[in-house]
Image (cartoon, rainbow, N blue to C red):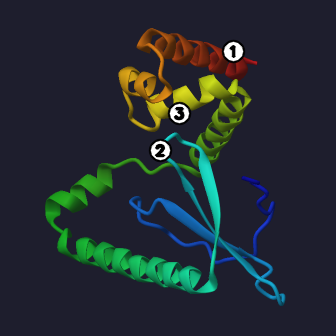
């Protein structure tokens, strides 16, 4: 199967999404006579999958995202008003705010980590992602890959060592 997907997509408004929303939709060439619509998601092995979909499905998913955003805003507003007690106000007053510098530094560290993970050999990268981000055990990963779990442990340990080396440079 040819996995030739567009490098850039049409501009879309940035939307807050529910943490339970596992997909992203985008279009390419929406202002042309042959627009293409895509859905992207991470499969169970942690690999990003992109599929071309038709306009009708794209519109349904877009509407679902808007409805979901509306619900999230409603919930936030409800909680904000319902939790204005003395205890919650005191907790907010003593909660340290993250500075702009801290936010930028955290974003920079995350980008460095993502670049370092991308530099890992494919097998190490996939196993590391499944273990730390996919919440799978060594045994579950070994069963998926048809090998023994000590091989997974060794691979994940090597990935961590490589990440430490990449990040210390």
Say which label, 1 or 2, has the lower sequence index: 2
33 lies left or right of 100: right
At a point 18% along the width and 74% down the height, the residue shown is 82
Tell me which label, 3 or 1, sits earlier in the chain.
3
Which residue is at a point 68% across and 23% down the rendered structure image?
Answer: 167
First in sequence, mark 3 or 2: give its number: 2
The residue singled out by tag 3 in the image is 129
Quarter holding residue 114? top right
Q: CA distance from mark 3 to mark 1?
A: 18 Å
The residue labelled by disc 2 is: 44
Residue mark closest to the camera, 3 vs 2? 2
Q: Position of residue 148 (x, y in %)?
A: 44, 13
Q: Could you tell me which residue is drawn at 80 percent across and 65 percent down?
A: 8
Q: Residues within 10 Å of mark 2 (few under 14, many from 20)?
A: few
Q: Is residue 47 above or below residue 128?
A: below
Q: Is residue 45 above or below residue 162?
A: below
Quarter the C terminus occupies:
top right
Which type of secondary structure does the marked residue at label 1 adopt? Answer: helix
Label 3 to label 2, Cα distance in Å? 11 Å
- In whole angstroms, how far apart are the C-alphas of marks 1 and 2? 28 Å
Label 1: how many Cα within 10 Å (few below 14, some 14–19, many 20+): few
Considering every residue shown, the one lying at the far left of the view is 86
Q: Residue at x 58, y 80 (%)?
A: 58
Q: Which residue is mark 1?
A: 165
> Which type of secondary structure does the marked residue at label 2 adopt?
loop
Q: Residue furthest front?
A: 1
Q: Quadrant of residue 92?
A: bottom left
Nearer to me, 97 or 82: 82
Q: Position of residue 88 (x, y in %)?
A: 20, 60
Q: Is 140 positioned to the left or the right of 123 in the image?
A: left
Left or right, 164 with respect to 78, comes to right
């Amino acid at each position: 199967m040819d996995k030739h997907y567009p490098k850039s997509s049409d501009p879309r408004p940035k939307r807050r999404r529910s943490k339970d929303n596992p997909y992203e939709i985008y279009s390419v060439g929406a202002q042309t006579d042959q627009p293409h619509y895509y859905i992207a998601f991470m499969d169970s092995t942690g690999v990003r999958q992109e599929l071309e979909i038709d306009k009708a499905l794209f519109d349904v998913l877009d509407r679902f995202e808007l409805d979901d955003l509306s619900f999230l805003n409603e919930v936030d507003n409800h909680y904000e008003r319902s939790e204005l007690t003395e205890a919650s106000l005191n907790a907010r007053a003593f909660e340290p705010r993250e500075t702009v510098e801290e936010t930028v530094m955290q974003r920079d560290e995350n980008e460095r980590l993502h670049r370092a993970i991308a530099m890992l050999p494919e097998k190490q990268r996939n196993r590391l992602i499944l273990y730390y981000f996919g919440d799978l055990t060594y045994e579950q990963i070994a069963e998926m890959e048809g090998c023994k779990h000590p091989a997974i442990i060794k691979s994940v340990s090597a990935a961590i060592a490589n990440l430490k080396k990449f990040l210390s440079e």
